[in-house]
Image (cartoon, rainbow, N blue to C red):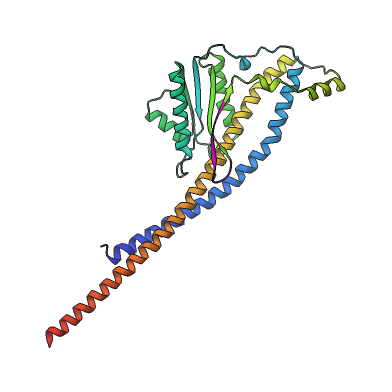
Amino acid sequence: MASVQDLRRRIHSVRNTRKITRAMELVAAAKLRRAELRIKALRPYAETMNELIAGVGRASSSLRLPLLEQRDEVQAVAIVPLTGDRGLAGAFNAQIIRRAFAVERALQAEGKTVRWVAVGKKGRSTLTFRRRELAGAYIGFTDRPAYEDAQAIAHRAAELFIAGDVDRVTLVYNTFVSALTQRVTEQDVLPISADILETDEEERAADVLRGDFIFEPEPEQIMERLLPVYLETQVYRALLESTASEQGARMTAMRNATKNAGELIDTLTLHMNRARQAEITQEILEVVAGAEALL
C-alpha cells in the first residue's frame, strides 16, 4: 500500500494536470466559436460562387477546361487527409487516418495507384512512418487556416491533375456536426463535377425573362478563371470544417479528462485518508504496547 506522502504527491500532480486540461478546454471552446463564425461567413460566398459558375455555364454551349475533364479510366488517385498539427483531440486524427488508409486499400484493390498530399503534422508524421511517398505536405496552420493555405493545397492538387499524375483528387476530413460529433467525409474535388453547371427549369425561365447577357471576355475565359477559385473555396471550406471539428473534439476530450482527474483525486484522497488512519492506528498500538511493556 502506498504511503500517505506518496498519495499526497499523486494528488498534487493530478490537480496540476486538471488545471491544464481545464485551461485547454476553455481555449478550445473559444477557438471553436471563432471557427463556427468563419464557416457561417463563408457560406454566402460559396453560394454566390456556385450561382456565378452556373450562370456562366448557361451562357456556353460546351466547355472544355482541364479541371472539368472527366477521364474515361481512372488510374491514379490523390488522397488528401486533413489532420491537425497537434494531438489531445480524442479520436479526431485517428479516424481521419483510418479512413484514408481504408480508401487507399479499396483503390489498390481496384488496381489504382495512390498519391498522398498530407495536411497537418499528424497526418504527415503517420504517412512518413508508414513509408508513404508524399506529393506535398502542408503544416503549421490547422488551428487557424487562412485562404492562402487553401490556395496552396488547391494549386498543388490542380497541378497534379492537369499534369496527368492523378485522375482524381479526394479530400478526407471531419465535417463538424457538433462539439460531440464529427463525421468523416470523403469528397472528390477534382475533376470538378459538371453538376455545378446545370440549372433547373425555373432558372432557365428567369434567364429568358431577363434576356441574354453579353460576356466580356468570353464565357469560356471567365469559367477558366472561376474554376480554380471554386476549387480553392471547396478546399477552404473543408479546412474550416476540419478546424471546427478538431476544436470540438479537443474541447470534449479535455472536458472528459478534467472530469476523470476530479474522480481520480477523490479516489486518491479516500486512499490517503485510509492510509493516514492506518498509520495513526499503528502508532496508537505501538504506544499502548510500549506502555504495557513498562508495567
Along the horizontal axis of the image, is 165 left or right of 278? right
User: Is 184 contained in the magenta span?
Assistant: yes
Q: 295 or 9, which is in the foreground?
A: 295
Along the horizontal axis of the image, is 222 left or right of 160? right
Instruction: Name the residue: 70% across, 20% down.
Output: 197
Q: Position of residue 170 (x, y in %)?
A: 54, 25
Q: Position of residue 282 (x, y in %)?
A: 23, 74
Q: Position of residue 128 (x, y in %)?
A: 40, 28
Instruction: Name the residue: 62% across, 27% down.
Output: 232
Vertical placement of residue 19 versus 294, above or below: above
Q: Quadrant of residue 125?
A: top left
Q: Is residue 260 visible?
A: yes
Q: 37 or 269, which is in the foreground?
A: 269
Instruction: Name the residue: 61% across, 33% down.
Output: 237
Instruction: Name the residue: 82% across, 16% down.
Output: 214
Q: Position of residue 243 (x, y in %)?
A: 55, 39
User: Is 278 contained in the magenta span?
Assistant: no
Q: 22 or 144, which is in the foreground?
A: 22
Along the horizontal axis of the image, is 218 left or right of 125? right
Give the extent of the magenta segment: 177-187
Along the horizontal axis of the image, is 197 left or right of 20? right
Locate the C terminus and report the quarter of the image it occupies.
bottom left
Q: Quadrant of residue 1?
A: bottom left
